[in-house]
Image (spheres, helix red, strand yellow):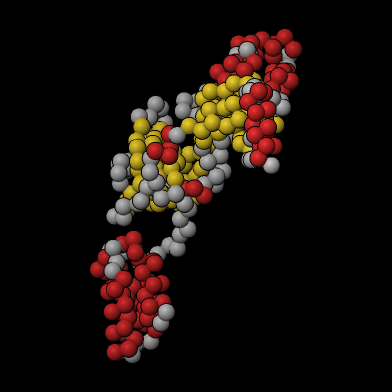
Amino acid sequence: MDKVESLANQIFEDYKDYGVDRKEIVEKLKKLLIEFRVPENEAIRTIRNYIIREYGAPATIRRERITKIEEIKEPNKWVTVKAKVIQLWESSSPSIAQVGLIGDETGYIRFLVWTKAKKQPVEEGKSYIFRNVVVDDYGGVLRLNVTKISEIEEIDEDVNVKQPEELSEDVEVVGALVAIQQNSGLIQRCSVEGCNRVVKMGKCPEHGKTRAKDDLRIKGVLDDGYRTYEVIINEDGVESLTGINLEKAKKIAEETLDRGAVLTELKKMLLGKYLRIVGTATPRYLIAKHVEFFKPDIRKEIERVKAILEEV
Ligand SMILES: [Zn+2]
């Protein structure tokens, strides 16, 4: 690439979100550098000033790293994403101004705008840069939080979005439950409306000391022989597998004076067992909608092995 092209590309990269025409930059650069023999730095400054004036671009360009949605895999990270608002849902809490789904060409993620952030509402179908938003984990689903220090900028660009069918598709996995994590069993959640985060030692990571409510769940690892899945099984699933519901779990805790006794009991019944789980796959978790013990059909299995042996 010649000098003019590479300089033009640099300038274009900085200002392409402002509707700048790349060809125009090349033309102007050529004129300045070749025709008028203006020094390189001077030529670049002239063109930047021209763009700021003509296209209303800001005088200082932040070189920002835009994170692709598929790259968002864990909570507590601050990111900037360029995405289109796909759906807005009704917020069930006065502390949440907007809640919905945004997407880019790599995937989708839930987002919410906290009322305290005092942002201009976003609209379905429009594209934005969401700057300095923080990822959190809500019951196994990652979300982007727009807070006071976040910034939402509407852009003219129409962000391409991955096809929505892939979103609601359920997956079925059969595998062995090889681990049950410590924060399983009879757990406590923050009772602040819209929060629901897991409370540890009486503290919510967002709200500090809080009134907690009990919940029953399993966070575990399922191994299907190809890969492992982090799975979340909620109260209904736990009950259908073990007969233990929230009431029973509380009773076990009361009788033993030990909340951990529920986890011990669940481990006894479930660790190492084969489960069939149908659920929603999020970037991080498989959230079970339906779960049952898996009993392989022995006769079919023998037929299958025989067939393989005959082929050999
Ligand atoms: Zn909370």
Instruction: Please tell me whether residue 278 is drawn above or below residue 149 in the rendered image.
Output: above
Q: Quadrant of residue 250?
A: top right
**Rendered residue at 45%/55% (across/down):** 66
Q: Position of residue 259 (x, y in %)?
A: 70, 18
Give the quarter of the image for residue 204.
Answer: top right
Residue 171 placement (x, y as % from top left): 51, 33
Residue under the point 32% across and 42% down: 122
Q: The C terminus appears in which quarter of the rendering?
A: top right
Residue 260 locus on image (x, y percent): 72, 21
- Residue 188 in percent (x, y) is at 60, 23
* Placement of the N terminus among the 4 image quadrants: bottom left
Confirm whether residue 214 shows in the render.
no
Identified at 74% across, 20% down, the residue is: 268
* Vertical side of 151 occupied by 179: above or below: above
Q: In the current view of this chain or complex, which residue is farthest to the front?
A: 310
Classify residue 240 as left or right of residue 254: left
Seen from the viewer's position, the closer of residues 99 and 107 is 107
The residue nearer to you, when weighing 158 against 54, is 158
